Amino acid sequence: MTSTPKIAEKLTDHDGPRHVAIIMDGNGRWAQMRNRPRLFGHQAGARRVREIVEACPDCGVDYLTIFAFSTENWKRTQNEVAGLMSLFRRYIRREMEAFRAENVQVRFIGDRPRLDKKLRDLMDEAEAFTADCTGTNLTIALNYGGRDEVARATQRLARDVADGRLDVEAIDEETLPRYLDTYVLPDPDLVIRTSGEARVSNFLLWQSAYAEYEFIDTLWPDFSEEIFADLVKAYGNRDRRYGGAKG
């Protein structure tokens, strides 16, 4: 994808984030505002993902992580959950070829066993099909929850201690991340949430300890490449001290 003049201008000489994570919120409200079913909004939101992925190289973003379905989203109506699962299957089938052609490496995080086998197989296939891609790294959080992730990581860590592969005295804050779903990824620099809600909703809790946050009113289906570029550029103006004193 070629940069639009607007994006190219916005990103001149910026010191942007390497890893951006997005809580894609507002699909249902976007659809309701148009007197359409919630799934119509989810479909529009899925199309928006492709555009933001394509904008990442022009914005200097190497890693993009998106929150597609949380461990709490199972509480939604059976019809909405079934529609979302069908949408995920169609999306992966449709986008795999395009992502590979655009050199996008795709991976999934989250607790997979609860997902149906057809969807899990497609996830495995997408990861294998794009494994050699060296461009944008797209991570899709599907049946993901930050607390659930830490609990599963702790279980794996405890098994290694019990089996003698890990010394309990050697465990520190550098140890647990090796057991997280995101162990191959850098921590996010910038977390964006759309739709005007100002909460993190159990997303990347450990990884985002020092991330910068942007809570914006725009509903996800209306989130544009230009808005993305603006937020990436604004990140470069922040003073990140990681607990240290200025100067």
Image (cartoon, rainbow, N blue to C red):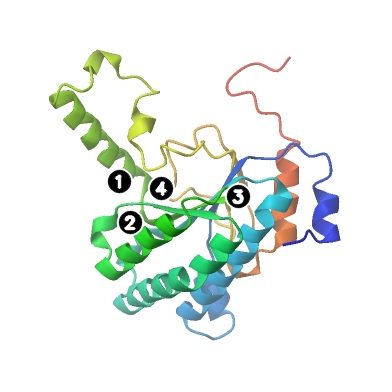
Type of amino acid under label 2: Thr
Q: CA distance from mark 4 to mark 2?
A: 9 Å
Residue type for callout 4: Asn
Distance between the alpha carbons at the discs numbered 2 and 3: 29 Å
Above or below for 181 versus 52:
above
Checking the image for residue 121, the label placed there is none
Q: Do the residues under discs 2 and 3 have CB atoms within 8 angstroms? A: no
Q: Residue at x 64, y 23 (%)?
A: 241
Q: Is residue 69 visible?
A: yes
- From the viewer's side, name the closer residue of 205 and 96: 96
Quarter of the image with the C terminus in it: top right
Q: Classify mark 4: helix, strand or loop.
A: loop
Of pointers 3 and 1, the one earlier in the residue sequence? 3
The answer to whether residue 163 is above or below residue 36 is above
Q: Where 155 falls versus 63 (above or below)?
A: above
Residue 203 lies, in percent from the top left, at: 44, 47
The residue that disc 2 covers is 71
Cα distance, mark 4 to mark 3? 28 Å
Decide: few, some or many residues near mark 2? Use Cα within 10 Å; few <14, some 14-19, many ≥20: some
Q: Residues within 10 Å of mark 4 (few under 14, many from 20)?
A: some
The kind of residue tagged 3 is Gly
Q: Which residue bears the numbered disc 4?
A: 202
Q: Which residue is mark 3?
A: 135
Q: Which residue is under mark 1? A: 148
Label 4–label 2 contact, CB within 8 A: yes
The quarter holding residue 146 reads top left
